[in-house]
Amino acid sequence: RTDRICVRETEVKGLKIPEGMQIAVPIYILHHNEKLWQDPEKFDPERFSAENKAKIKPCQFMPFGFGPRICIGKRLAITEMKIALAKLLREFILVKCDKTKVGTRE
């Protein structure tokens, strides 16, 4: 869950948030916001390359949440993904097709 309860009256960029108000973090909207991501609907693993990762602001990308309440299963999920990828690479042969773009980094 990404919703929180405001524990004291707060003001953020001129917006007053009263004590007790529930606040939800719209993660899907953050991850698909054109102001934060160039072409957000496009699958682009390069946006997380070492050089581009430094440009990503805190809380701009948070698939597991953020801060002290980050998902407890984050490390397990990432480990499982690495194992699944290793199994796929071990079991299958990857073949380039005509539509595969190779060496097109911009």
Image (tube, helix red, strand yellow):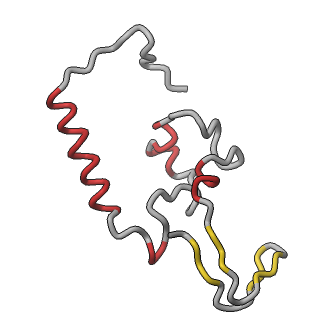
The answer to whether residue 23 is above or below residue 85 is below
Residue at the extreme top of the image, as rendered:
98
The answer to whether residue 19 is above or below residue 83 is below
Q: Decide which of 52, 6 is in the foreground and name it.
A: 6
Quadrant of the image occupied by residue 93: top left
* For residue 8, side relative to residue 69 (left or right): right
Quadrant of the image occupied by residue 9: bottom right
Residue at the extreme left of the image, as rendered:
90
The C terminus lies in quadrant: top right
Q: Decide which of 46, 4 is in the foreground and name it.
A: 4
| Residue shown at 54% from the left, 69% from the top | 2
The answer to whether residue 37 is above or below residue 101 is below
Please provide percent x and percent y for residue 94: 26, 20
The answer to whether residue 2 is above or below residue 51 is below
Please provide percent x and percent y for residue 78: 31, 54
Please provide percent x and percent y for residue 79: 25, 54
| Residue shown at 21% from the left, 33% from the top | 88
Residue at the extreme right of the image, as rendered:
14
* For residue 13, side relative to residue 47 (left or right): right
Label total for image: 0
Q: Decide which of 97, 58 is in the foreground and name it.
A: 97
Please provide percent x and percent y for residue 97: 36, 11
